[in-house]
Amino acid sequence: MANVTRGEDYSTQRLKQRYYFQDSNMDLFLVGALGWGPAGGLSIGEAYYVASQITDGDADSWSRAFESQGIAQSKQADEWQRRGAIRAAGEMRLKAFVCYRMAWQFVAPGERFIALCCAHEKLFDQAMVELGFPVTRFAVNYGGGKLPGHFFRATDPTAPTVLVIGGADTCHEDRFLSQGRYLFERGYSVALVDLPGQGRVQEQGLHWEPAAEKSIAAVIDELITSFGVQPRKLALLGMSLGGYFACRAAAHEPRLAAVIATTPLPCPFELFERVGKQTAEATTVSQAAQKNMEVILWKAGVSGLSELAQRWEGMIVEPGQVQVPFLSILGEQEGQVWKDQARQWHETIPSSKKSFVTLDAQSGADIHCQGNNPLRLAQEVDAWLREVL
């Protein structure tokens, strides 16, 4: 959910420290882009060059700067491809994917948003081919539309599978750089997928669903049928709003062997209500925050924050239904809503195999979903899964 400003109310924040931009939304996603660097995203030099071309809080300058960098990187990838330097081409193509994916972050719903998404999808698939990843694109029939995804098959056919679900501001391809690549390189099969309201699925009229276990069940059906995934070795990792989806799945989907959430959010209504209150009281809202909110509302299928809160009122995951092993992860820069819900969730679920991890400033992984150090999240997930699976 979009931060309105770096004001006194930190209840819904996703980061507290300033890294580069005064605008908290831009700062969060720039840090996220930097965090993807070790997994094949932008280098520090590339990311800071793009940032230097952006006017703080100006959404249009953000989009232009990232797209311009993506165009240059795509041309360089083509040149290396022509010269037979296929790996270098794939590496640069993956960077171009990051730029096009970042370019749509603060673009209002419409033709430009869709065009940038389509460009990032094409670049991602081409990069996967050039880099030689054993990946299969798939689509899940659901609600009259299709949920797109990618499946990365581990070398060991008996290896566990991790299904990675993003949140309000993500697409499934960017979860490859956030967690997918790290988990795949640790020997797991990895499934990445967009649920309703994620990526550009909302273009099909499929918006966020409070009963997220229904779409997750359809995805699991597909993983079992098409890829031979065994439920006893299937884990789910939910990030941000995906933390709510993970809680729903843990309570209602019996075919999961383990569930991880960063951060557990069993009652998103509280978050939506607080954001609505902050927005109404804000004296100034940046162009970036405004456009980001337009996309959020589009993904949710509502006309405003009050309608969003009304639609989700009463949607609470009952912790008493959770028996599956569950790992809760919390960064210390998260706002109080995130902190309170995560801790209460962990304390009240009856699972006999539950763990709670808090990541502080020294870990370098203390912002929302460990965006400043996603490798640390993968390490925590891997270590825990090896204990419970």
Image (cartoon, rainbow, N blue to C red):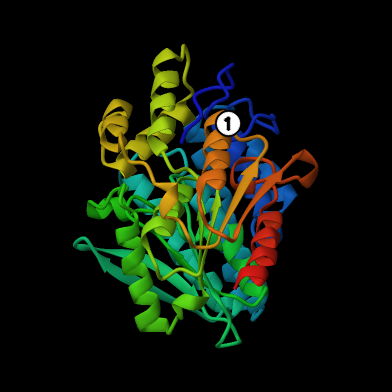
Q: Quadrant of the C terminus?
A: bottom right
> Which residue of the protein is positioned furthest toward the right in this rendering?
362
The residue sitting at 57% across, 44% down in the picture is 347
The residue sitting at 30% across, 51% down in the picture is 211
Quadrant in which residue 256 is drawn: bottom left
Q: Which residue is mark 1?
A: 335
Whether residue 154 is visible: yes
Whether residue 37 is visible: no
Along the line of sight, the residue nearer the viewer: 352 or 218: 352
Are there few (<14), some (14-19), or many (20+) residues within 10 Å of tag 1? many
Quadrant in which residue 94 is drawn: bottom right
Q: Secondary structure at mark 1?
A: loop
> Which residue of the protein is positioned furthest toward the left in this rendering?
144
Along the line of sight, the residue nearer the viewer: 94 or 247: 247
- What is the x, y in percent for residue 216? 36, 62
- What is the x, y in percent for residue 274? 43, 25
Decide if residue 162 is on the left or right side of residue 224: right
- What is the x, y in percent for residue 263? 55, 46
Decide if residue 363 is on the left or right side of residue 128: right
